[in-house]
Amino acid sequence: MKFNYYVETDSLYIDLAEKSSVESVEISEGIVIDYAENGNIVGIDIDQASKKINISSLETHSLPLGNISIAA
């Protein structure tokens, strides 16, 4: 899973799988779910992310994290 924040557009993309999206559905204003060919969710796009969620903090609970990578 990868979190990509784009300052210039204030959008956050949560990449859930390394598969291509074949369909996108806006489930709420500015929140789009991307689906793979098999119907699984592969990503979540949040426009105007800083107005919808707290992007200054990231917490994980009980995740089996084997490989953590932090890039600035």
Image (spheres, grey):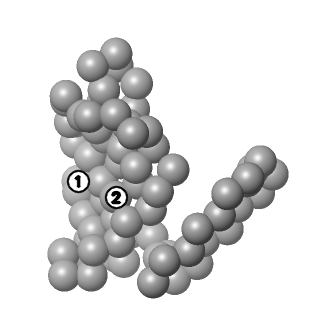
Q: Quadrant of the C terminus?
A: bottom left
The residue under the point 36% across, 77% down is 50
Which residue is drawn at the image coordinates 40% and 24% (left, top)?
A: 40
**Residue 33 at x, y = what percent?**
31, 40
Helix, strand or loop under label 1: loop
Q: Looking at the image, which residue is at 51% across and 50% down?
A: 1
Q: Is residue 36 visible?
A: yes
Q: Secondary structure at mark 2?
A: strand
Q: Amino acid at mark 1?
A: Glu
- Gap in angstroms between the C-alphas marked 1 and 2: 15 Å
Task: List the single residue furthest toward the right.
Answer: 62
Question: Is residue 69 placed above or below 56 in the rendered structure?
Answer: above
Which residue is farthest top? 38
Q: Position of residue 16 (x, y in %)?
A: 45, 43
What residue is shown with label 2? 13
- Left of 14 or right of it: where is 47? left
Residue 3 at x, y = what percent? Answer: 44, 62
Task: Give the residue at mark 1.
Answer: 29
Work out whether 15 lies above or below 7: above
Q: On the image, which quarter does residue 4 sit in? A: bottom left
